[in-house]
Protein backbone atom coordinates (compact mmCIF):
# COMPACT_ATOMS: atom_id res chain seq x y z
CA UNK A 1 0.00 0.00 0.00
CA UNK A 2 1.32 3.44 -0.88
CA UNK A 3 1.04 6.54 1.31
CA UNK A 4 -0.13 9.75 -0.26
CA UNK A 5 2.34 12.54 0.64
CA UNK A 6 0.15 15.24 -0.79
CA UNK A 7 0.57 18.52 1.17
CA UNK A 8 -2.05 18.81 3.89
CA UNK A 9 -3.76 22.13 4.67
CA UNK A 10 -2.35 24.05 7.68
CA UNK A 11 -4.69 23.77 10.62
CA UNK A 12 -3.06 26.21 13.07
CA UNK A 13 -0.88 29.33 13.17
CA UNK A 14 2.75 28.61 12.32
CA UNK A 15 5.59 29.47 14.69
CA UNK A 16 7.25 31.82 12.19
CA UNK A 17 4.11 33.92 11.99
CA UNK A 18 3.45 33.71 15.72
CA UNK A 19 6.88 35.19 16.54
CA UNK A 20 5.88 38.37 14.76
CA UNK A 21 3.28 39.04 17.46
CA UNK A 22 5.20 37.76 20.48
CA UNK A 23 7.54 39.63 22.81
CA UNK A 24 10.80 37.72 23.01
CA UNK A 25 12.75 37.39 26.23
CA UNK A 26 15.95 39.33 25.68
CA UNK A 27 19.03 40.50 27.51
CA UNK A 28 20.28 44.04 27.82
CA UNK A 29 23.14 44.74 25.37
CA UNK A 30 26.26 42.83 26.40
CA UNK A 31 29.88 44.06 26.26
CA UNK A 32 32.83 41.70 26.12
CA UNK A 33 35.38 44.37 27.09
CA UNK A 34 34.21 44.73 30.69
CA UNK A 35 36.88 43.56 33.15
CA UNK A 36 36.78 43.25 36.98
CA UNK A 37 38.61 46.61 37.33
CA UNK A 38 40.09 45.64 40.68
CA UNK A 39 42.29 48.74 40.89
CA UNK A 40 39.30 51.09 40.61
CA UNK A 41 37.26 49.00 43.02
CA UNK A 42 39.89 48.54 45.72
CA UNK A 43 41.58 51.95 45.81
CA UNK A 44 40.40 54.38 48.51
CA UNK A 45 39.20 57.52 46.71
CA UNK A 46 40.05 60.95 48.10
CA UNK A 47 38.01 64.05 47.39
CA UNK A 48 40.17 66.47 45.39
CA UNK A 49 38.86 70.03 45.49
CA UNK A 50 40.45 72.51 43.13
CA UNK A 51 41.29 69.65 40.73
CA UNK A 52 44.80 69.23 42.23
CA UNK A 53 46.32 67.19 45.06
CA UNK A 54 49.70 68.08 46.58
CA UNK A 55 51.80 65.37 48.23
CA UNK A 56 53.95 66.95 50.94
CA UNK A 57 56.95 64.89 52.05
CA UNK A 58 60.06 65.33 54.10
CA UNK A 59 63.10 66.60 52.24
CA UNK A 60 64.72 63.81 50.25
CA UNK A 61 68.20 64.10 48.81
CA UNK A 62 68.57 62.86 45.22
CA UNK A 63 71.21 60.17 44.92
CA UNK A 64 71.30 59.89 41.13
CA UNK A 65 70.25 56.27 40.94
CA UNK A 66 68.15 56.53 37.79
CA UNK A 67 68.46 54.24 34.80
CA UNK A 68 70.18 54.92 31.53
CA UNK A 69 68.76 54.63 28.02
CA UNK A 70 70.53 53.33 24.94
CA UNK A 71 70.31 53.87 21.20
CA UNK A 72 70.26 50.62 19.22
CA UNK A 73 71.07 50.65 15.48
CA UNK A 74 71.33 47.15 14.06
CA UNK A 75 74.02 45.44 16.11
CA UNK A 76 75.42 48.75 17.39
CA UNK A 77 74.49 49.81 20.92
CA UNK A 78 75.41 53.23 22.28
CA UNK A 79 74.48 54.95 25.51
CA UNK A 80 72.57 58.18 24.92
CA UNK A 81 75.06 60.88 26.01
CA UNK A 82 72.59 62.96 28.03
CA UNK A 83 71.63 59.83 29.98
CA UNK A 84 75.13 59.66 31.49
CA UNK A 85 74.01 62.38 33.92
CA UNK A 86 72.11 59.59 35.71
CA UNK A 87 75.50 58.49 37.10
CA UNK A 88 75.73 60.23 40.50
CA UNK A 89 79.04 62.08 39.89
CA UNK A 90 77.72 63.49 36.60
CA UNK A 91 74.31 64.61 37.84
CA UNK A 92 73.67 68.13 36.57
CA UNK A 93 76.63 68.11 34.14
CA UNK A 94 75.56 69.93 30.97
CA UNK A 95 78.58 69.93 28.63
CA UNK A 96 77.18 68.05 25.63
CA UNK A 97 80.56 67.79 23.91
CA UNK A 98 82.16 66.04 26.87
CA UNK A 99 79.15 63.75 27.35
CA UNK A 100 79.33 62.76 23.66
CA UNK A 101 83.05 62.07 23.94
CA UNK A 102 82.45 60.01 27.08
CA UNK A 103 79.66 58.00 25.41
CA UNK A 104 81.94 57.24 22.45
CA UNK A 105 84.50 55.65 24.78
CA UNK A 106 82.17 52.92 26.01
CA UNK A 107 82.85 49.59 24.29
CA UNK A 108 80.23 46.91 23.68
CA UNK A 109 80.73 43.46 25.18
CA UNK A 110 78.49 40.40 24.84
CA UNK A 111 78.33 38.29 27.98
CA UNK A 112 77.15 34.69 28.26
CA UNK A 113 75.03 33.30 31.13
CA UNK A 114 77.22 32.47 34.13
CA UNK A 115 80.08 34.72 33.05
CA UNK A 116 81.56 36.97 35.76
CA UNK A 117 81.42 40.64 34.83
CA UNK A 118 83.18 42.06 37.90
CA UNK A 119 84.72 40.15 40.80
CA UNK A 120 84.72 40.88 44.51
CA UNK A 121 88.04 42.25 45.78
CA UNK A 122 89.43 43.17 42.35
CA UNK A 123 90.30 46.74 41.45
CA UNK A 124 87.55 48.94 40.00
CA UNK A 125 88.92 49.58 36.52
CA UNK A 126 85.66 49.85 34.56
CA UNK A 127 82.30 51.55 34.58
CA UNK A 128 79.77 48.96 33.38
CA UNK A 129 76.44 49.88 31.82
CA UNK A 130 73.88 47.10 31.31
CA UNK A 131 72.18 47.67 27.97
CA UNK A 132 70.29 44.37 27.99
CA UNK A 133 70.10 41.32 30.22
CA UNK A 134 69.99 40.41 33.88
CA UNK A 135 72.93 40.36 36.32
CA UNK A 136 73.09 38.97 39.87
CA UNK A 137 75.14 40.76 42.53
CA UNK A 138 76.59 38.69 45.38
CA UNK A 139 78.78 39.76 48.28
CA UNK A 140 80.77 37.98 50.96
CA UNK A 141 79.25 37.63 54.42
CA UNK A 142 80.95 37.88 57.79
CA UNK A 143 81.93 34.19 57.76
CA UNK A 144 82.88 33.95 54.10
CA UNK A 145 79.54 32.70 52.77
CA UNK A 146 77.99 34.39 49.76
CA UNK A 147 75.19 36.91 50.26
CA UNK A 148 72.56 37.84 47.68
CA UNK A 149 72.67 41.59 46.97
CA UNK A 150 69.89 41.60 44.40
CA UNK A 151 69.59 41.73 40.64
CA UNK A 152 70.28 44.51 38.14
CA UNK A 153 69.12 44.67 34.55
CA UNK A 154 68.48 46.90 31.53
CA UNK A 155 69.55 50.48 32.22
CA UNK A 156 71.39 49.84 35.47
CA UNK A 157 75.06 50.55 36.01
CA UNK A 158 78.01 49.28 38.05
CA UNK A 159 81.21 51.01 39.11
CA UNK A 160 80.28 54.70 38.87
CA UNK A 161 82.67 55.17 41.83
CA UNK A 162 85.52 54.90 39.33
CA UNK A 163 84.83 58.51 38.32
CA UNK A 164 85.71 59.88 41.75
CA UNK A 165 87.49 57.17 43.77
CA UNK A 166 91.29 56.54 43.75
CA UNK A 167 92.72 53.77 41.52
CA UNK A 168 93.11 51.38 44.46
CA UNK A 169 89.34 51.30 45.05
CA UNK A 170 88.05 47.67 45.06
CA UNK A 171 84.82 45.98 44.00
CA UNK A 172 82.65 45.17 47.02
CA UNK A 173 80.62 42.49 45.23
CA UNK A 174 80.70 40.01 42.37
CA UNK A 175 78.42 40.55 39.37
CA UNK A 176 77.56 37.48 37.30
CA UNK A 177 75.32 37.29 34.22
CA UNK A 178 72.08 35.39 34.75
CA UNK A 179 71.11 35.68 31.08
CA UNK A 180 72.85 36.62 27.87
CA UNK A 181 73.79 40.27 28.34
CA UNK A 182 74.92 43.23 26.30
CA UNK A 183 77.06 45.56 28.40
CA UNK A 184 79.08 48.69 27.70
CA UNK A 185 82.43 49.16 29.45
CA UNK A 186 84.41 52.33 30.02
CA UNK A 187 87.99 51.61 31.10
CA UNK A 188 89.84 53.73 33.64
CA UNK A 189 92.47 54.47 30.99
CA UNK A 190 89.89 55.84 28.52
CA UNK A 191 88.22 57.92 31.24
CA UNK A 192 91.50 59.34 32.54
CA UNK A 193 92.51 60.33 29.03
CA UNK A 194 89.31 62.35 28.59
CA UNK A 195 89.56 63.80 32.10
CA UNK A 196 93.05 65.16 31.39
CA UNK A 197 91.69 67.08 28.40
CA UNK A 198 88.44 68.44 29.91
CA UNK A 199 88.54 71.22 32.47
CA UNK A 200 84.74 71.17 32.72
CA UNK A 201 84.71 67.47 33.67
CA UNK A 202 87.44 67.96 36.30
CA UNK A 203 85.47 70.83 37.82
CA UNK A 204 82.28 68.73 37.90
CA UNK A 205 83.97 65.85 39.72
CA UNK A 206 85.81 68.16 42.15
CA UNK A 207 82.52 69.82 43.04
CA UNK A 208 80.93 66.40 43.57
CA UNK A 209 83.71 65.34 45.96
CA UNK A 210 83.49 68.57 47.94
CA UNK A 211 79.70 68.66 48.05
CA UNK A 212 78.54 68.47 51.67
CA UNK A 213 77.07 65.11 52.61
CA UNK A 214 73.67 65.70 54.15
CA UNK A 215 72.75 63.66 57.18
CA UNK A 216 70.02 61.34 55.99
CA UNK A 217 68.25 58.13 56.90
CA UNK A 218 68.22 54.92 54.85
CA UNK A 219 65.36 56.28 52.73
CA UNK A 220 67.31 59.38 51.73
CA UNK A 221 65.25 61.73 53.94
CA UNK A 222 66.85 64.49 55.99
CA UNK A 223 67.64 63.07 59.43
CA UNK A 224 65.84 64.10 62.61
CA UNK A 225 68.38 64.28 65.44
CA UNK A 226 67.19 62.49 68.58
CA UNK A 227 69.07 61.61 71.79
CA UNK A 228 68.43 58.38 73.69
CA UNK A 229 70.00 56.35 76.46
CA UNK A 230 71.23 59.36 78.49
CA UNK A 231 70.78 59.52 82.25
CA UNK A 232 71.99 62.96 83.30
CA UNK A 233 71.59 66.54 82.22
CA UNK A 234 73.13 66.00 78.82
CA UNK A 235 72.76 68.66 76.15
CA UNK A 236 69.97 67.54 73.88
CA UNK A 237 70.30 67.97 70.12
CA UNK A 238 68.18 70.57 68.41
CA UNK A 239 66.34 69.51 65.31
CA UNK A 240 63.48 70.26 62.96
CA UNK A 241 61.66 68.41 60.22
CA UNK A 242 62.41 69.88 56.81
CA UNK A 243 59.86 69.61 54.02
CA UNK A 244 60.36 69.03 50.33
CA UNK A 245 60.52 72.53 48.78
CA UNK A 246 59.04 71.28 45.47
CA UNK A 247 56.28 68.82 46.34
CA UNK A 248 54.57 66.81 43.62
CA UNK A 249 51.13 67.95 42.56
CA UNK A 250 48.68 65.65 40.83
CA UNK A 251 46.12 67.34 38.60
CA UNK A 252 42.95 65.45 37.80
CA UNK A 253 43.07 63.86 34.37
CA UNK A 254 39.99 63.34 32.21
CA UNK A 255 38.52 60.70 29.92
CA UNK A 256 35.70 61.97 27.71
CA UNK A 257 33.52 61.09 24.78
CA UNK A 258 30.40 62.43 23.07
CA UNK A 259 27.46 60.03 22.99
CA UNK A 260 25.05 60.59 20.10
CA UNK A 261 21.53 59.17 19.96
CA UNK A 262 19.03 59.63 17.09
CA UNK A 263 15.83 61.23 18.43
CA UNK A 264 13.69 58.71 16.53
CA UNK A 265 15.47 55.88 18.34
CA UNK A 266 15.11 57.61 21.70
CA UNK A 267 11.42 58.33 21.10
CA UNK A 268 10.12 55.13 19.49
CA UNK A 269 12.34 52.22 20.49
CA UNK A 270 12.26 52.38 24.28
CA UNK A 271 10.15 49.34 25.13
CA UNK A 272 11.07 47.24 26.99
CA UNK A 273 14.52 48.88 27.30
CA UNK A 274 15.43 52.55 27.32
CA UNK A 275 17.82 52.90 24.37
CA UNK A 276 19.46 56.06 25.70
CA UNK A 277 20.04 54.45 29.08
CA UNK A 278 21.65 51.37 27.52
CA UNK A 279 23.84 53.48 25.23
CA UNK A 280 24.97 55.49 28.25
CA UNK A 281 25.61 52.40 30.36
CA UNK A 282 27.94 50.86 27.77
CA UNK A 283 29.69 54.19 27.15
CA UNK A 284 30.40 54.57 30.87
CA UNK A 285 31.78 51.03 31.00
CA UNK A 286 34.22 51.94 28.20
CA UNK A 287 35.24 55.12 30.01
CA UNK A 288 35.91 53.24 33.23
CA UNK A 289 38.03 50.72 31.34
CA UNK A 290 40.07 53.56 29.83
CA UNK A 291 40.35 55.19 33.27
CA UNK A 292 41.91 52.10 34.80
CA UNK A 293 44.23 51.69 31.80
CA UNK A 294 45.50 55.24 32.31
CA UNK A 295 45.97 54.69 36.04
CA UNK A 296 48.43 51.93 35.20
CA UNK A 297 50.06 53.28 32.04
CA UNK A 298 49.81 57.08 31.83
CA UNK A 299 53.28 58.60 31.41
CA UNK A 300 52.66 61.28 34.04
CA UNK A 301 50.79 59.54 36.84
CA UNK A 302 50.42 55.84 35.87
CA UNK A 303 51.57 53.43 38.55
CA UNK A 304 53.99 51.59 36.25
CA UNK A 305 55.72 54.87 35.39
CA UNK A 306 55.85 56.61 38.75
CA UNK A 307 57.20 53.69 40.79
CA UNK A 308 60.45 54.70 42.49
CA UNK A 309 63.53 52.98 41.07
CA UNK A 310 64.45 51.71 44.52
CA UNK A 311 61.09 49.92 44.63
CA UNK A 312 61.58 48.07 41.33
CA UNK A 313 63.03 44.58 41.46
CA UNK A 314 63.66 41.81 38.94
CA UNK A 315 62.76 38.16 38.93
CA UNK A 316 65.56 35.82 39.93
CA UNK A 317 65.20 33.36 37.07
CA UNK A 318 62.65 34.84 34.64
CA UNK A 319 59.17 33.50 35.51
CA UNK A 320 57.50 34.82 38.69
CA UNK A 321 58.38 32.55 41.60
CA UNK A 322 57.34 32.42 45.26
CA UNK A 323 60.79 33.82 46.10
CA UNK A 324 60.12 36.85 43.89
CA UNK A 325 56.72 37.44 45.48
CA UNK A 326 58.25 37.18 48.96
CA UNK A 327 60.85 39.83 48.14
CA UNK A 328 58.24 42.08 46.54
CA UNK A 329 55.86 42.12 49.50
CA UNK A 330 58.56 42.10 52.21
CA UNK A 331 59.95 45.47 51.07
CA UNK A 332 56.94 47.38 52.40
CA UNK A 333 54.68 47.37 55.42
CA UNK A 334 51.05 46.35 55.18
CA UNK A 335 50.80 45.39 51.50
CA UNK A 336 47.12 45.35 50.56
CA UNK A 337 47.04 43.80 47.08
CA UNK A 338 49.06 42.37 44.22
CA UNK A 339 47.96 43.15 40.67
CA UNK A 340 49.11 41.12 37.67
CA UNK A 341 48.06 40.25 34.14
CA UNK A 342 46.09 36.96 34.08
CA UNK A 343 48.93 35.36 32.09
CA UNK A 344 51.39 36.35 34.84
CA UNK A 345 49.13 34.77 37.45
CA UNK A 346 49.06 31.60 35.35
CA UNK A 347 52.87 31.65 35.11
CA UNK A 348 53.10 32.03 38.89
CA UNK A 349 50.72 29.10 39.28
CA UNK A 350 52.98 26.93 37.10
CA UNK A 351 55.99 27.81 39.25
CA UNK A 352 54.05 26.93 42.41
CA UNK A 353 52.95 23.62 40.89
CA UNK A 354 56.56 22.80 39.97
CA UNK A 355 57.55 23.34 43.61
CA UNK A 356 54.47 21.54 44.92
CA UNK A 357 53.26 24.71 46.58
CA UNK A 358 49.54 25.45 46.71
CA UNK A 359 48.72 29.18 47.03
CA UNK A 360 45.99 30.11 49.47
CA UNK A 361 42.77 31.95 48.65
CA UNK A 362 41.00 34.87 50.28
CA UNK A 363 37.69 36.70 49.96
CA UNK A 364 37.59 40.16 48.35
CA UNK A 365 34.20 41.84 47.89
CA UNK A 366 32.51 38.48 48.32
CA UNK A 367 34.61 36.80 45.62
CA UNK A 368 37.21 34.09 46.14
CA UNK A 369 40.59 35.12 44.71
CA UNK A 370 44.13 33.78 44.90
CA UNK A 371 46.46 35.18 47.54
CA UNK A 372 50.09 34.98 48.56
CA UNK A 373 51.06 35.37 52.23
CA UNK A 374 47.54 36.68 52.82
CA UNK A 375 47.85 39.41 50.15
CA UNK A 376 45.16 39.12 47.43
CA UNK A 377 46.55 38.44 43.94
CA UNK A 378 44.13 40.22 41.60
CA UNK A 379 44.03 40.04 37.78
CA UNK A 380 44.21 43.09 35.53
CA UNK A 381 44.51 42.99 31.77
CA UNK A 382 45.54 46.68 31.80
CA UNK A 383 49.11 45.73 32.78
CA UNK A 384 50.83 45.42 29.40
CA UNK A 385 52.74 42.50 27.95
CA UNK A 386 55.81 43.52 25.96
CA UNK A 387 56.83 42.21 22.54
CA UNK A 388 59.33 39.84 24.16
CA UNK A 389 56.53 38.29 26.27
CA UNK A 390 57.41 39.94 29.58
CA UNK A 391 55.21 41.93 31.93
CA UNK A 392 55.18 43.51 35.41
CA UNK A 393 53.53 42.67 38.72
CA UNK A 394 52.47 45.49 41.05
CA UNK A 395 52.09 45.52 44.83
CA UNK A 396 50.27 48.33 46.64
CA UNK A 397 49.79 49.61 50.14
CA UNK A 398 46.62 51.70 49.99
CA UNK A 399 44.97 54.46 51.99
CA UNK A 400 45.99 57.93 53.20
CA UNK A 401 46.13 56.76 56.82
CA UNK A 402 48.85 54.24 55.91
CA UNK A 403 50.77 56.61 53.59
CA UNK A 404 49.76 54.44 50.68
CA UNK A 405 48.36 54.76 47.16
CA UNK A 406 45.10 56.67 46.77
CA UNK A 407 42.72 57.44 43.94
CA UNK A 408 41.83 61.07 43.32
CA UNK A 409 38.47 62.34 42.11
CA UNK A 410 36.04 65.20 42.64
CA UNK A 411 32.39 64.65 43.39
CA UNK A 412 29.47 67.04 43.23
CA UNK A 413 30.07 67.81 39.56
CA UNK A 414 27.34 69.51 37.52
CA UNK A 415 25.02 66.87 36.01
CA UNK A 416 26.84 64.15 37.97
CA UNK A 417 25.75 60.63 37.02
CA UNK A 418 28.21 58.65 39.16
CA UNK A 419 30.86 59.86 41.65
CA UNK A 420 33.45 61.73 39.60
CA UNK A 421 31.54 61.21 36.33
CA UNK A 422 28.99 63.51 34.72
CA UNK A 423 26.74 63.46 31.66
CA UNK A 424 26.00 66.86 30.13
CA UNK A 425 23.33 67.50 27.50
CA UNK A 426 24.89 69.28 24.50
CA UNK A 427 21.76 69.79 22.43
CA UNK A 428 20.01 68.43 19.34
CA UNK A 429 21.52 68.91 15.90
CA UNK A 430 19.64 69.87 12.72
CA UNK A 431 19.82 66.17 11.84
CA UNK A 432 17.78 65.28 14.93
CA UNK A 433 20.75 63.78 16.79
CA UNK A 434 20.93 64.23 20.57
CA UNK A 435 24.47 64.68 21.96
CA UNK A 436 25.70 64.06 25.51
CA UNK A 437 29.20 64.84 26.81
CA UNK A 438 30.30 62.01 29.13
CA UNK A 439 33.33 62.83 31.31
CA UNK A 440 35.18 61.22 34.19
CA UNK A 441 37.90 63.01 36.18
CA UNK A 442 40.54 61.06 38.09
CA UNK A 443 44.19 60.51 39.00
CA UNK A 444 46.21 58.28 41.33
CA UNK A 445 48.81 59.44 43.88
CA UNK A 446 51.63 57.61 45.66
CA UNK A 447 52.06 59.24 49.07
CA UNK A 448 55.47 57.70 49.89
CA UNK A 449 57.67 55.69 47.50
CA UNK A 450 57.50 52.34 49.30
CA UNK A 451 53.70 52.26 48.97
CA UNK A 452 54.19 51.01 45.42
CA UNK A 453 56.47 48.20 44.25
CA UNK A 454 56.95 46.64 40.84
CA UNK A 455 58.39 43.25 39.86
CA UNK A 456 59.75 43.88 36.37
CA UNK A 457 60.79 41.75 33.40
CA UNK A 458 58.48 38.92 34.43
CA UNK A 459 58.76 36.19 31.79
CA UNK A 460 55.49 34.48 30.90
CA UNK A 461 56.90 31.43 29.16
CA UNK A 462 54.76 29.27 26.91
Image: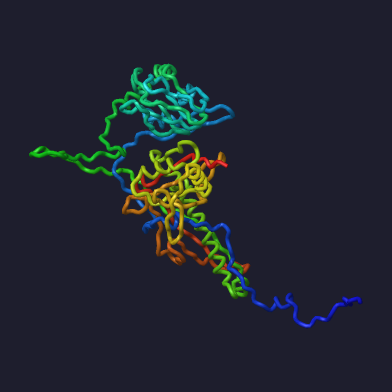
Vertical order, 351 against 107 (above or below): below
Instruction: Compare residues 216 and 257 and report the one nearer the observer.
Output: 216
| Residue farthest along the bottom direction in this orientation | 11
- Colour scheme in use: rainbow
Q: Quadrant of the C terminus?
A: top right
Which residue, as the protein is rendered here, is positioned at the far left? 233
Quadrant of the image occupied by residue 138: top left
Q: Kindly identify the residue that appears in the image at 48 percent across and 23 percent down.
A: 106
Q: Please provide percent x and percent y for residue 232.
A: 8, 39
Please report the residue visible at 43 percent of the width from the left and 55 percent of the height from the top: 442
In the image, residue 1 above or below residue 43: below
Residue 102 lies, in percent from the top left, at 45, 23
In the displayed image of the protein, which residue is found farthest to the front?
A: 1
Q: Is residue 150 visible?
A: yes
Q: Is residue 97 above or below residue 69?
A: above
**Quarter occupied by residue 23:** bottom right
Q: Nearer the viewer, residue 367 or 52?
A: 367
Name the one closer to the observer, 305 or 259: 305
Nearer to the camera, 122 or 436: 122
Q: Quadrant of the N terminus?
A: bottom right
Residue 244, percent from left and from top: 30, 43
- Residue 197 visible in the snapshot: no
Q: Tell me if 177 is positioned left or right of 250 in this view.
A: right
Q: Where is residue 65? Give x, y as percent.
A: 38, 34
Amino acid sequence: MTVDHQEQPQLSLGTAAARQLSTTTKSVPQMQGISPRWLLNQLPWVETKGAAFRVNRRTTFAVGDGRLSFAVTGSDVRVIPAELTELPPLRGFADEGVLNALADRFRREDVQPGQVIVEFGSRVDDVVLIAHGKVAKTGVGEYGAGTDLGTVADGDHLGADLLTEPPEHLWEYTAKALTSCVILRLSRHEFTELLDRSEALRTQLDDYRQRPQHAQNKNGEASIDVASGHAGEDVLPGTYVDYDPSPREYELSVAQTILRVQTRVADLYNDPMDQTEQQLRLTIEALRERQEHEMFNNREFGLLNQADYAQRIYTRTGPPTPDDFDELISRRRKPKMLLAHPKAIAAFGRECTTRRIYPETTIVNGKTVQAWRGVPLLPSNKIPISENNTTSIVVLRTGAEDEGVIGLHQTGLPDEYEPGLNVRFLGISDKAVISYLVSTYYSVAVLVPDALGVLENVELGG
